[in-house]
Amino acid sequence: MSHGEPQGNVHSGKLVIRNIGLVLSGALENPILDADTVVSVDGRITAIGRAKDVDTEGANTIIDANGVTLTPGLIDSHVHPVAGDWTPRQNQMSWIDSNLHGGVTTMISAGEVHMPGRPKDIVGLKAMAIFAQRAFENLRPSGVKVLAGAPVIENGMVEEDFKEMATAGVRWLGEVGLGSVKDGPTARKMVAWARKYGMNSTIHTGGPSIPGSGLIDADVVLEADTDIVGHINGGHTALPDGQIRCICEGCKRGLELVHNGNERSALYTLRLAREMGDLNRVILGTDAPAGSGVQPLGILRMISMLSSLGDVPAEVAFCFATGNTARLRALDCGIIEVGRAADFVFMDKAQHSAGKDILESVRLGDLPGVGMTVIDGLVRSQRSRNTPPAGKVPTIVQG
């Protein structure tokens, strides 16, 4: 696979995926679809159903799923990219490609904070946000959609700064609290400006993660009113349970659980969300690269951990990493639904897992094996080099 490809794709033609054993939709309200065939044209899903009811003629590419499970491409809601497929945080190459082999097809930047010499003056931070947005718009590492250009807000910014960035294509706000803005009133004002111009926002929650960051507690999180409560289970250090409960009950924003956080606090948050009937607010990220490294299987590990220890069905846990994120982040992927991006992962239970099928194996705490990924209707990787080997894998029979 190429390590960098132009953004966007209009030449994939017609893709037919047949003989699917199980279709996980990514949509919490209907997580399992009655279908064995999915069709896309030029990177958009056009049909989902039974083979006899779907037009499969004239395909450019045919994939025989061989009875494995099809899921939406996984979304990592919290990464810190810098440039291309290299991270200075761990001086590691091809970390994004490795995440693709863990089923991640879309990543959302929570700020390019590891950029060496990151500018913190207002002109510089705006320029860097626009640069990062342009760079990852122009080049996809291994085909992965890296949604970057997430400025970290600093004191002194005015409404016109947010309008300027949004006009230039910046869609995201980096973690509030990683810059000089750490108080609720200032954060709330700037987050409102960002929202006015269509920018989706997140906030650092918990103790400091790197020198220069600081404690962001429940009062600041609630007053800032970002779209996403970033790593509510800490990145790495979590808030006390009482403050986590206060946040969960005090707003209706997204509750992001990350791999590089406190696992007990993640399970506590999940329990609160379930009790409140708010599982639609739960989304997943890795918060990588970080001091603990890069986790290519981080999203799969979160799905398995939350299902096995958090007592949620596996098909629901998959929604946390797909449709929930897509809806809270206003993305066109993440759900297997007509009109959405044709981003898929083919999975099967790992060889020798104690579970009788993929859903039971995940409920038992095992990771599934990834056999193939597809982004915008194009095959991007085949049998994963990182997951346990899948029991069965799909085959490309044409194209």
Image (tube, rainbow, N blue to C red):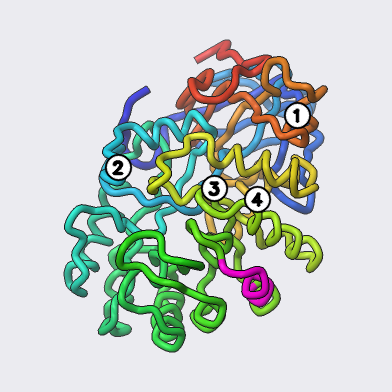
Figure check: 51 above or below 215: above
Mark 2 or mark 3, earlier in chain: 2
Q: Residues within 10 Å of mark 4 (few under 14, many from 20)?
A: many
Q: Is residue 311 left or right of residue 182?
A: right
Mark 1 or mark 2, earlier in chain: 2
Choose between 371 and 138: the one closer to the eye: 371
Q: Residues within 10 Å of mark 1 (few under 14, many from 20)?
A: many
Question: Label 1 amino acid?
Answer: Ser
Q: CA distance from mark 1 to mark 2?
A: 33 Å
Q: CA distance from mark 1 to mark 4?
A: 18 Å
Q: Residue 398 occupies which quadrant of the picture?
A: top right
Q: Position of residue 264 (x, y in %)?
A: 65, 54
Question: Label 2 amino acid?
Answer: Thr
Choose between 54 and 395: the one closer to the eye: 395
Residue that badge 3 annotates? 259
User: SS class of the residue under badge 2?
Assistant: strand
Residue that badge 1 annotates? 361
Q: Residue 196 occupies which quadrant of the picture?
A: bottom left
For the residues bearing labels 1 and 2, Cβ distance under 8 angstroms: no
Residue 244 lies within the magenta run: yes
Residue that badge 2 annotates? 87
Figure check: 21 above or below 33: above
Residue that badge 4 annotates? 320
Residue located 67% across and 42% down the image: 305
Prevalent SS, magenta region: helix
Q: Is residue 239 left or right of residue 193?
A: right
Magenta stretch bounds: 239-247
Q: CA distance from mark 3 to mark 1?
A: 20 Å
Residue located 47% across and 38% down the image: 295
Mark 2 or mark 4, earlier in chain: 2
